[in-house]
């Protein structure tokens, strides 16, 4: 009977004794759980990084679109302004070329008038023709100068050539104005003398 009880106690002791490897399994599972947690944390961080990158790209894309629209509007405005300027410049150039041609013709006409070669018998007539020519040239000059002498072209017409105290037409006009009474009297005297 004593022997049977002893065996029973031995069996109970064996059942209550810790099984070999149970602590190692717990540590292994704990390490796996920690490893899995770290992996999940890295995945979460990677997802957050990609989300931030996507937001940054979206923000940069919107900045590009806004900048693109703004610059396109400015470029379009500038292109239209340049087109208008080119058109206006061509019109202005055409007007200047026509004015230059007119002025050059008037210069040639006025330079061709030489009072010393006027006919004595028709001095008054030649003088009147010269005065009419002078007035016509001056009228064209004043009209074209008023039309063209605006803005950046103002310097073309606002002053006389440097180094000259007077223009040719002004000198001619003053000379004729000063000498007109003498010329008229001389013409009358000549006519009286011829008709005697």
Image (cartoon, rainbow, N blue to C red):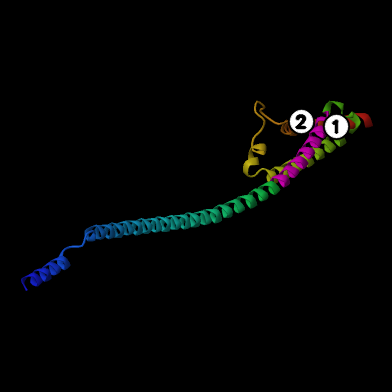
Magenta stretch: dominant secondary structure: helix
Residue 87 appears left or right of 113: left
User: Residue at coordinates 86% horizontally, 30% vertically from top-left?
Assistant: 189
- Residue at 78% x, 42% y is 98
- Name which residue lies at 12% across and 71% down: 8
Horizontal and vertical percent for residue 172?
Answer: 75, 31
The span picked out in magenta is 89-114
Asked if 141 appears above or below 176 in the picture, the reply is: below
In-image side of 73 versus 175 (left or right): left
Asked whether 145 falls inside the magenta stretch, the response is: no
For mark 2, what is the residue? 179
Secondary structure under badge 1? helix
Q: Position of residue 68 (x, y in %)?
A: 55, 54
**Residue lying at the far bottom of the rendered structure:** 1
Quick one: quadrant of the N terminus? bottom left
Q: Is residue 174 visible?
A: yes
Tell which of 164 and 95 is nearer to you: 95
The furthest residue to the left: 2
Circle number at residue 187: 1
**Place of residue 161 in the rendered image (x, y in percent of width and height, measured from the top left):** 67, 30
Mark 2: few, some, or many residues within 10 Å (few <14, many ≥20)? few
Q: Position of residue 194 (x, y in %)?
A: 93, 29
Task: Tell me how far mark 1 sits from mark 2, CA to CA.
Answer: 12 Å
């Amino acid at each position: 009977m004593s022997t049977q009880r002893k065996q029973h106690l031995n069996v109970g002791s064996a059942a209550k004794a810790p099984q070999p490897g149970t602590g190692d399994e717990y540590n292994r599972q704990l390490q796996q759980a920690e490893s899995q947690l770290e992996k999940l944390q890295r995945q979460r961080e990677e997802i957050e990084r990609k989300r931030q990158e996507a937001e940054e790209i979206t923000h940069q894309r919107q900045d590009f679109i806004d900048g693109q629209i703004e610059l396109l509007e400015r470029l379009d405005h500038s292109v239209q302004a340049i087109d208008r300027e080119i058109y206006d410049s061509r019109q202005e150039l055409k007007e200047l070329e026509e004015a230059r041609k007119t002025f050059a013709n008037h210069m040639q006409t006025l330079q061709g008038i030489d009072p010393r070669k006027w006919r004595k018998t028709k001095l008054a007539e030649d003088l009147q023709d010269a005065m009419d020519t002078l007035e016509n040239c001056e009228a064209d000059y004043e009209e074209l100068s008023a039309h063209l002498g605006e803005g950046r072209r103002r310097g073309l017409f606002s002053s006389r050539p440097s180094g000259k105290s007077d223009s040719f037409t002004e000198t001619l006009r003053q000379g004729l104005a000063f000498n007109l009474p003498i010329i008229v009297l001389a013409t009358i005297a000549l006519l009286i003398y011829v008709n005697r």
